[in-house]
């Protein structure tokens, strides 16, 4: 009998994927649930990852001409009511403030003071289209005031009944862009530009392959004329919506009265867009890259790139090993990686070297450098790369490490993307019959074991009723109508009616 491989994470992905995900978060010390149900505390290692995501993406957003601003957390209820479809879409998720003061009641406990009831309830920001639209209506008078290109980094609240850290929480962090334009073409161009920014960021920084496309009508953002998205495949073959960009047309402009005098002297309504990504990107990084030994971080967004671990068994070698490691840390920290310096952790804690190595492995740091007396004597380092696994650690001369460190990090980045891309490709199928579609999304299918769920590229006639029936029967949704499927018109596998193109069906988070 073969000896079972010992993993740091229990259960494994194969045994219980949802619980494995929770254990990764715990083992990597990323976040934990808060005393407020549905909310999370993002711990320093996890928040550092978010800060890197924020810093890089913020730079990309600003490169496209946008500026950052901040708008209020509280939104008057009447603002949401101005756009009927919008308020309907968010009504069940809103947290509402009704009082502005507490008092001690007859039982000695705090309660909202009856006399402090607000004349108009305030909604805790679920998204900011309505209040930003109100501001834009004050700012815009002439075509010369357009375009307005603004982004904000903020928190939002959407009441969540089935929370899961990073993926679905009542409060989460995000950026939301809101723009106003003088023409439909310019607004549509903006919508696609930002979708491309998100796809670029996902693939080149998060090492996350994505499919770009348009949402079906039933999946659109409430109040939008068109919603575009990037969709990624996780290791359980479910889809994750990793970013959205919305063409809002003139719907919100008419609701908020964002009007301007055109260059021809006519009063016109502005054309608007909105777009955003959230902390669920961290959940995506976990689920697309991590393994049964813990978190795996793409180097370009990792909180730190390398951990130096002094391995000291005897007191008489301590000073020598620490001095060697300190010099190594300083030398590496002075090296450039992208637009920044290499970020190096020098772990001098007085605990067993193997325990330290496992901790950093579980935290997903791209490279672990172990140094003991023998390494000092041979002017070398024992190197472990997170993408290759601990069994592939090897000794490397100090000079070789220094000369290849940045290249190795880029190799890790590329390996993670390539691995995820291959996984997506081998789990994406063109399915041309209802029977095969049903088999594809049937768990533990015995008749066709090679078909086991993933992305189904199938023809669909465009019927919302068919879409709803598929969702109810199989727990599957149309993730997007992709921009490029490699083929054209066909026949809907559910109705036999004409279909304009294949769409991506999947189970999703």
Image (spheres, rainbow, N blue to C red):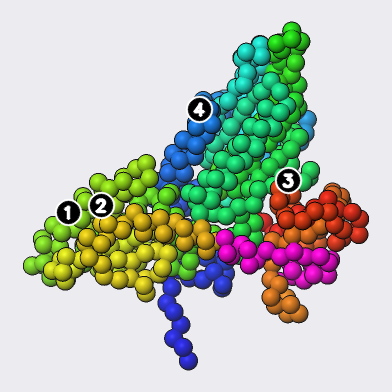
Query: Residue at coordinates 50% horizontally, 54% vertically from top-left?
Result: 207
Which residue is at 77% across, 56% downward? 487
Number of residues whose C-alpha sits closer than 10 Å to that of mark 3, classed few (under 14), some (14–19) or many (20 or more): many
Magenta region: 421-444
- Separation of disc 1 and disc 4 at Cα? 40 Å
CA gap, disc 1 to disc 2?
Answer: 9 Å
Q: Secondary structure at mark 1?
A: helix
Residue under the image location 28 percent in, 53 percent down: 345
- Give SS at disc 3: loop
**Are the two marked residues, 3 and 2, in contact with CB atoms closer than 8 angstroms?**
no
Label 2–label 4 contact, CB within 8 A: no
Q: Nearer the viewer, residue 232 or 378?
A: 378
Q: Residue furthest left?
A: 316
Q: Which residue is mark 1?
A: 327
Distance from disc 4 to disc 3, alpha carbons, whole Å, reads 27 Å
Residue 180's x, y, as percent? 65, 24
Q: Give the mark nearest the N terminus, 1 or 4.
A: 4
Q: Nearer the viewer, mark 2 or mark 4?
A: 2
Q: Which residue is mark 2?
A: 332
Instruction: Identify the residue at horizontal 53%, vertical 51% (top origin).
Output: 203
The residue pinned by badge 4 equals 68
Give the crowd class for mark 4: few <14, some 14-19, many >=20 residues within 10 Å.
some
Name which of mark 4 and mark 3 comes first in the sequence. 4
Rendered view: 350 above or below 254 = below
Mark 1 vs 2, N-terminal side: 1
Residue 151: image quadrant is top right
User: Residue 495 location in percent, x, y?
Assistant: 90, 58
What residue does disc 3 label? 215
């Amino acid at each position: 009998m073969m000896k079972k491989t010992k993993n740091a994470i229990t259960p494994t992905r194969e045994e219980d994927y949802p619980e494995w995900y929770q254990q990764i978060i715990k083992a990597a010390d990323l976040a934990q649930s808060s005393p407020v149900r549905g909310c999370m505390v993002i711990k320093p290692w996890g928040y550092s990852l978010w800060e890197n995501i924020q810093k890089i993406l913020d730079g990309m957003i600003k490169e496209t001409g946008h500026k950052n601003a901040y708008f209020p957390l509280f939104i008057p209820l009447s603002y949401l009511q101005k756009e009927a479809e919008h308020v309907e879409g968010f009504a069940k998720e809103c947290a509402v403030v009704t009082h502005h003061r507490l008092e001690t009641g007859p039982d000695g406990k705090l309660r909202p003071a009856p006399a402090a009831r607000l004349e108009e309830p305030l909604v805790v920001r679920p998204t900011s289209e309505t209040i930003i639209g109100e501001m834009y209506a004050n700012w815009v008078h002439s075509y010369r005031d357009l375009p307005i290109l603004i982004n904000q980094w903020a928190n939002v609240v959407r009441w969540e009944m089935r929370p899961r850290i990073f993926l679905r929480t009542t409060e989460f962090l995000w950026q939301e862009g809101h723009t106003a334009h003088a023409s439909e073409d310019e607004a549509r161009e903006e919508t696609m530009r930002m979708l491309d920014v998100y796809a670029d960021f996902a693939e080149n920084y998060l090492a996350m392959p994505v499919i770009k496309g348009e949402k079906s009508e039933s999946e659109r953002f409430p109040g939008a004329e068109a919603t575009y998205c990037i969709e990624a495949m996780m290791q359980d073959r479910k889809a994750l919506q990793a970013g959205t960009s919305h063409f809002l047309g003139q719907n919100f402009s008419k609701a908020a009265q964002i009007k301007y005098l055109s260059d021809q002297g006519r009063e016109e309504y502005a054309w608007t867009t909105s777009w955003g990504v959230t902390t669920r990107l961290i959940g995506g990084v976990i689920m697309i890259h991590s393994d049964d030994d813990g978190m795996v971080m793409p180097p370009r967004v990792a909180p730190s790139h390398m951990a130096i671990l002094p391995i000291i068994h005897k007191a008489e070698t301590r000073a020598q090993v620490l001095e060697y490691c300190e010099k190594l840390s300083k030398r590496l920290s002075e090296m450039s990686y992208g637009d920044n310096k290499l970020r190096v952790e020098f772990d001098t804690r007085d605990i067993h070297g193997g325990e330290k190595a496992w901790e950093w492995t579980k935290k997903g740091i791209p490279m672990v450098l172990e140094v003991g007396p023998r390494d000092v004597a041979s002017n070398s380092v024992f190197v472990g790369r997170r993408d290759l696994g601990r069994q592939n650690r090897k000794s490397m001369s100090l000079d070789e490490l220094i000369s290849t460190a940045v290249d190795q990090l880029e190799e890790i980045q590329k390996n993670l993307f390539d691995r995820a891309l291959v996984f997506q490709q081998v789990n994406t199928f063109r399915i041309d019959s209802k029977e095969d579609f049903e088999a594809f999304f049937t768990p533990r299918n015995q008749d066709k074991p090679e078909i086991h769920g993933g992305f189904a590229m199938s023809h669909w006639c465009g019927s919302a009723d068919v879409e709803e029936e598929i969702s109810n029967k199989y727990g599957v949704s149309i993730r997007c109508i992709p921009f490029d499927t490699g083929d054209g018109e066909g026949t809907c596998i559910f109705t036999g009616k004409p279909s304009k193109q294949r769409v991506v069906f999947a189970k999703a988070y």
